[in-house]
Image (cartoon, rainbow, N blue to C red):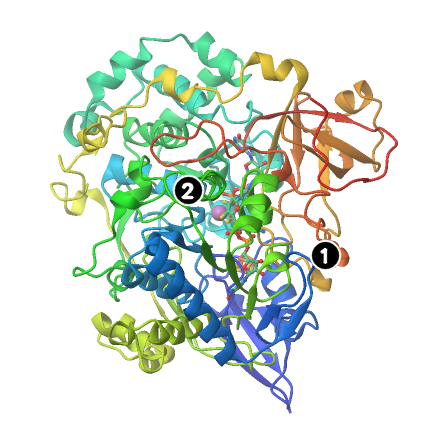
Amino acid sequence: MSTKKDIYCYICPSHCALKATFDETGRMIKVIADSKSGEHCDICDCAKGPGTIPEAHSHGKRLQFPMKRAGERGRNQWLRITWDEALDTIAEKMKFYRDNFGPESIAMVLGEPKSMDYAFAQRFATFLETPNVITPGNYCGVQTGHADQFSIGTMHVLGDTQVDPKCIIIWGSNPQNTGSNFRCFAQKDVARALKNGAKLIMMEPGKNRYCEKADHWLKLKPGSDGALAMGMAKVIIDEDLYDKDYVAKYTVGFEQLKAEVANFTLEDAADATWIAADKIREVARLYATAKPGLIMWGNAIENSVAALQICRAISMLRGLTGNVGVPGGELINTPAVFGRPGRFYFDRGHPRPTFKSIGKEFPIAMGAAYVPTQSLVQTILTEDPYPVKMAMCHVTNPILTYPDSVATHEAFMKLSFLVVAEIFPTSTTAIADIVLPAALPLEHDSIAYWPAWLGHIRAQPKCVEPPGEAWPDSKMINELAKRMGMREHFFENWEESLDLMMADSGMSFKEFCAVRVLGPTKHYLKDAPEAYFKTPSKKFEFYSQQMAQLGISPLPTFKEVTTQRFGPEQFQRYPLHLTNGKEGAYFSSGYRHIEAMKKYKAEAICELHPDTAARYKLTDGEMIWIESAKGRIQQRLKVADHVHPNVVVAAFGWWDTEAEDNEYNWRKNNINILTEGDGATCPATGSVQLRGIPVRVYAEEESWGTPGRKAAA
Ligand SMILES: Nc1nc2c(c(=O)[nH]1)N[C@H]1C(S)=C(S)[C@@H](COP(=O)(O)OP(=O)(O)OC[C@H]3O[C@@H](n4cnc5c(=O)[nH]c(N)nc54)[C@H](O)[C@@H]3O)O[C@H]1N2
Ligand SMILES: Nc1nc2c(c(=O)[nH]1)N[C@H]1C(S)=C(S)[C@@H](COP(=O)(O)OP(=O)(O)OC[C@H]3O[C@@H](n4cnc5c(=O)[nH]c(N)nc54)[C@H](O)[C@@H]3O)O[C@H]1N2
Ligand code: SF4
Ligand SMILES: [Mo]
């Protein structure tokens, strides 16, 4: 007899409602979308949740037992050990490095939270007194979140699903693949608004399903989004299209913004973006007049040396057109009442010693409790200002996802002790000293609270057994904390933390499981005009004094947003502009072992315009080389009309999962061989340039020879 249970997808942060079927042995055999539940169910095109989840819980390659390295580091030879031996060894090493090199010599290296993993790791770092918590914040969520924070005083903002917008801009986001707008505005909301006549504008140098439906599709130069936004702001101001009443009543800094847009011409914006001035004018007029308007922005605008200011420039458009707080626009919300995750991470008695932190030069990073990923790599390699000896990785695969994989590999190989908690073998577990098998969500009780800025939480009770001896990350950290003398700050059983997180809601975790979900409340400006914006001025801030105090430009300038990491000299040798979006069928570098998803994509594919392919004598379907100043990789070519002739759209997160024993399996087709971590970065957030990397392409007949080869100089 099979049974069914209601679950939430844990693969991406959209957390769709799903229904799982279990056989009589308790094995999960099938997962389907639960679109009738009335809950959020915005299934991605490849249906990653239903496709991935059942296989993930019973996959033969899942890590099942703690293991220690048996051979030379990186040779992937392992000995099974007990949890006691694993945790005792880790605690012993940790005490040694803490006592001899200071707690800052130990790094907690984290990815996006899945359940309580991130919360436990942050709390552990607090009581260990290391400031060095590394997260993907330098390229994910922080730049858009802080742009909102400075413009409207909060990251808690969602689309209005009661009233349709008349104009939608999808800006560097791929909603049908990534769930990237999470619960901001779902695909069904977009479909309804379009059906009711809303106009659609795409800011997209590649392509996604929405491009063909769009009224305007701007194939802008990768990384030039700030110039486009400033150009649009100029049109809206110069042509008097801004919402005068709104600007007068609810904003500060308009005069400064007006003065700034007088500093450049629309032709300057056109030059910077590859978009004709007339086109910029046309979309600016449309967005300013077809009101209300909604900008669904995504990750592609967060990855450059001007990332924070680019996101701020785009956010200006919302203030100019009076689209924040109005029906059909973008609404500030109050998060569901539950334990603030920040309270769990930090402790008044143990302030983070940020003065010792790696990456302390990035003011936003310090405020948001993350160290930029490339700062960790550079510090390990240079030992400046001190050596980092040990790292614990949870829910992350740095060798694939950090910029400059060769440098990252070298740095992680240099660590004296590396612990990696994972669900599958990866290029990062391959070089660990100890590998810890992690239990996925649904294999243990958990609360899904990420992304925190959505103010939305879901109960995720255990419904399937973990494989072998896999443990939740939270349990690993809790048990390690006891061995590190932090018992009083942690729990007898880590699950007690779930009740603590729920305490403010007046519910226990068990009671919450019956309710299942707590959502935020959206507000309109008209209901509380004086208190709507949470900024110091209680207005929409084009000009932010807070930013000035942090040493960051208070207003985005055209000069700053058009600052390019790579100039014409680099593009002479490497004439094409490389960028990427996330894969539709996989989540970042994860889940490449899942057979069910291989029917969508089984290998790394890059796209080029037919003219570009012809220019370099490349044929559709062949393996081609993509080379940057940092190195070169191979991906299979797909010739595609929609790609701008100067652009290569490559695939992200790939490595050769079949060649697990090849310690260099991460070099072949991994896009981050081409990116850099030692160049200029966003001075506020530490974002690196992942958009518009200068590359060249060729088809030289040559097999993948010596691993680790770098491009000829
Ligand atoms: N299927 C799937 N879902 C995911 C993930 C995944 O790997 N796979 N990853 C998760 C994570 S970590 C994140 S951060 C989100 C991100 O999800 P999104 O916010 O959707 O971001 P991306 O997919 O990186 O890029 C979105 C689009 O931007 C385009 N683009 C590339 N360069 C530029 C540019 O310079 N300017 C503009 N305007 N557009 C550009 C790409 O072609 C792509 O279509 O998705 C999450 N969800
Ligand atoms: N060139 C380029 N680089 C990029 C990006 C890009 O677009 N282009 N995107 C960037 C962005 S936005 C992000 S967020 C990062 C993402 O980079 P990472 O933070 O490294 O994320 P993932 O690649 O998803 O790796 C997560 C790993 O956790 C494992 N895992 C899954 N669930 C669990 C669990 O419950 N416990 C444990 N212990 N492990 C688990 C998965 O198997 C996977 O290997 O990459 C960034 N790097
Ligand atoms: S969009 Fe896809 S991966 Fe994301 S939660 Fe929904 S089903 Fe899961
Ligand atoms: Mo991300």
Q: Residues within 10 Å of mark 2 (few under 14, many from 20)?
A: many
Relative side of 568 to 623, left or right? left
- Measuring 54% from the left and 49% from the top, which residue is drawn there? 414
Q: Quadrant of the C terminus?
A: top right
Disc 1 crowd rating (10 Å Cα; few below 14, some 14-19, many 20+) is some
Q: Are marks 1 and 2 in contact (CB under 8 Å)?
A: no
Q: Based on the displayed image, in which of its 4 quarters is residue 324 positioned?
A: top left
Residue 452 in sight in this render: no
Query: Which residue is found at the position 65% from the left and 56% from the top?
Result: 74
Q: CA distance from mark 1 to mark 2?
A: 27 Å
The amino acid marked with disc number 2 is Pro
Q: Residue 147 at what x, y percent from top left? A: 32, 36
Amino acid type shown at disc 1: Thr
Judge whether 208 appears above or below 584 on screen: above
Mark 1 residue element: helix
Ligand 2 neighbours mark 1 (CB distance < 8 Å):
no
Q: Earlier in the sequence, mark 1 or mark 2?
A: 2
Q: Residue at x 71, y 42 (%)?
A: 669
Instruction: Assign a secondary structure to mark 2.
Output: loop
Q: Quadrant of the N terminus?
A: bottom right
Quadrant of the image occupied by residue 107:
bottom left
Establish whether ligand 2 lies closer than 8 Å to the Cβ of label 2.
Answer: no
Residue 448 rendering spot, x and y as whole percentages: 41, 66
The residue that label 2 is drawn on is 372
Frontmost residue, 62 versus 4: 62
Residue 53 % position (x, y): 60, 68
Q: Which residue is mark 1?
A: 657
